[in-house]
């Protein structure tokens, strides 16, 4: 009985030590994780707005833009995009929205300065099915979202027949539908709240 109590106390003490250590690690890395996410969003916004990667030939981040937060309700984040070297020129807007395909996804929608055109769509985070839903990250598929914002986009199986239609990925209709819905959501909220 005495040895069993010792073992119980040992497990409790070790659990407490590990819990405290884990809390310190979490607190120590939280800021770095937030900084990395901000850098990722800035790099994706640069690609969505300017069409230029943020990673230079030397492998270092080279930002040509800066992000200024703007208020759009019910989105993860929204930014006015301006030149990194200064100036007040609006290059466009970047809106980050969250939704569900097969699993949680986070996408960034780039919009022109006058909000009349979608300039790009980037996948910030996705846990879609490997080989199927993960194809939402393919540039060729995402490029078809570069369209006017005058009306919502419609997902179609087969060939797009109008400028407001987006072709679904074969075998990944749920993921395709989720991205299309999120792009429409981000666009509608930006149009309603930024004009």
Image: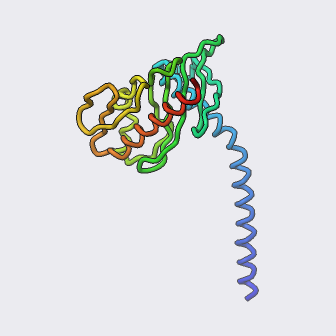
Answer with the quarter of the image where residue 139 lies: top left
Q: Residue furthest bottom?
A: 1
Q: Is residue 51 above or below residue 178?
A: above
* Residue located 36% across and 39% down the image: 135
- On the rendered structure, is 111 left or right of 172? right
Indicate the position of residue 163 as horizontal and vertical percent values.
32, 25
Q: Is residue 48 left or right of residue 4?
A: left
Q: Position of residue 159 (x, y in %)?
A: 24, 32
Expressed as whole percent of the image width and height from the top left, the position of residue 56 reads 51, 19
Asked whether the viewer can see residue 163, the reply is: yes
Q: How many labels were placed on the picture?
A: 0
Residue 17 rendering spot, x and y as whole percentages: 74, 62
Where residue 77 sits, quadrant-wise, is top right
**Figure quadrant of the N terminus:** bottom right
Q: Residue at x 58, y 19 (%)?
A: 65
- Residue sitting at x 34%, y 31%: 141
Check the image and tell me how it is coloured.
rainbow
Query: Closer to the camera, 101 or 1?
Result: 101
Q: Which residue is drawn at the image coordinates 49% and 18% (left, top)?
A: 50
Answer with the quarter of the image where residue 14 lies. bottom right
Between 166 and 20, the residue placed more toward the observer is 166
- In depth, the one of 4 and 189 nearer the eye is 189
Q: Is residue 3 above or below residue 192?
A: below
Residue 37 showing in the rendered view: no
The C terminus: image quadrant: top right
Residue 3's place in the image compared with 107, above or below, is: below
């Amino acid at each position: 009985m005495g040895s069993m109590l010792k073992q119980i106390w040992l497990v409790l003490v070790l659990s407490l030590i590990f819990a405290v250590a884990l809390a310190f690690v979490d607190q120590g890395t939280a800021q770095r994780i937030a900084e990395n996410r901000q850098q990722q969003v800035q790099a994706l916004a640069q690609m969505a707005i300017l069409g230029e990667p943020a990673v230079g030939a030397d492998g270092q981040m080279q930002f040509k833009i800066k992000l200024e937060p703007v208020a759009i309700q019910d989105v993860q984040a929204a930014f006015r995009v301006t030149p990194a070297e200064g100036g007040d020129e609006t290059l466009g807007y970047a809106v980050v929205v969250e939704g569900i395909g097969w699993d949680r996804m986070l996408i960034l929608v780039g919009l022109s300065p006058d909000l009349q055109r979608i300039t790009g769509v980037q996948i910030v985070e996705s846990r879609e099915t490997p080989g199927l839903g993960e194809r939402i990250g393919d540039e060729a598929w995402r490029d078809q979202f570069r369209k006017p914002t005058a009306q919502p986009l419609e997902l179609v199986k087969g060939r797009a027949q109008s400028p407001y239609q987006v072709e679904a990925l074969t075998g990944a209709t749920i993921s395709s539908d989720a991205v299309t819905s999120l792009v429409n959501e981000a666009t509608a909220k930006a149009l309603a709240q930024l004009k």
